[in-house]
Image (cartoon, grey):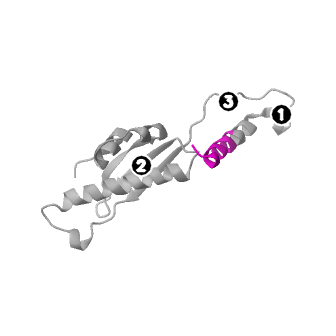
């Protein structure tokens, strides 16, 4: 955990505690609301990229698209957690560009990123992403 990451999370929690401190809102009471638990959730969806024309082959196009979407989802989720240290959970949905159908979806907890697997698809499934049949 980097120093900047720790500072950002601490600042986020401090803002929440300040909002719960009743005396800061010119209340007569000197006690405030005690923070029990905080969790930040990001809900995000995006359209899958189409496979490159050079990589298109009718017999394996669907498989390549799923592989590409899995790699893209892994990269996007990892980057979102790195960029937004105050986020604890990301609810991600990947949509087919043409039909709008859900290709994969799920909620990924920051703590689940520690799980490793040999393949990208298996890593995503361990993180909490479900693949829908296409």
Foreground label between 3 and 1: 3
Q: Name the residue under label 3.
A: 35
Q: Position of residue 104 (x, y in %)?
A: 32, 49
In this view of the protein, which residue sits in the foreground, 127 or 37? 127
In this view of the protein, which residue sits in the foreground, 21 or 63? 63
Please, what is the dominant secondary structure of the magenta stretch?
A: helix
Q: Residue furthest front?
A: 2
Q: Position of residue 14 (x, y in %)?
A: 71, 40
Q: Name the residue under label 1.
A: 23
Horizontal side, residue 47 vs residue 31: left or right: left
Q: Earlier in the sequence, mark 2 or mark 1?
A: 1
Q: In which quarter of the image is residue 72?
A: bottom left
Q: Residue furthest left?
A: 59
Q: Where is residue 53 in the image (x, y as percent from the top left)?
A: 24, 73
- At horizontal 26% and vertical 47% (from top left) the residue drawn is 132
Tell me the element at label 2.
strand
Q: In which quarter of the image is residue 37?
A: top right
* Disc 2 packing (10 Å; few <14; some 14–19; many ≥20): many
Magenta segment = 1-13
Q: Residue furthest bottom?
A: 54
* Disc 3 packing (10 Å; few <14; some 14–19; many ≥20): few
Contact between marks 3 and 1 (CB within 8 A): the answer is no
Q: CA–CA distance between discs 3 and 2?
A: 28 Å
Q: Mark 2 points at which residue?
A: 92
Tell me the element at label 1.
helix
């Amino acid at each position: 955990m980097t120093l900047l990451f720790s500072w950002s999370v601490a600042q986020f929690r401090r803002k929440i505690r300040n909002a719960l401190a009743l005396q800061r809102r010119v209340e007569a009471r000197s006690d405030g609301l005690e923070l029990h638990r905080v969790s930040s959730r990001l809900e995000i969806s995006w359209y899958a990229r189409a496979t490159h024309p050079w990589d298109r082959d009718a017999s394996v196009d669907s498989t390549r698209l799923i592989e590409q979407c899995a790699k893209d989802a892994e990269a996007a989720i990892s980057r979102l957690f790195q960029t937004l240290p105050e986020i604890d959970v990301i609810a991600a949905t990947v949509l087919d560009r043409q039909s709008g159908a859900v290709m994969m979806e799920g909620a990924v907890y920051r703590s689940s990123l520690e799980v490793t697997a040999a393949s990208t698809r298996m890593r995503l499934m361990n993180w909490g992403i479900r693949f829908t049949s296409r």
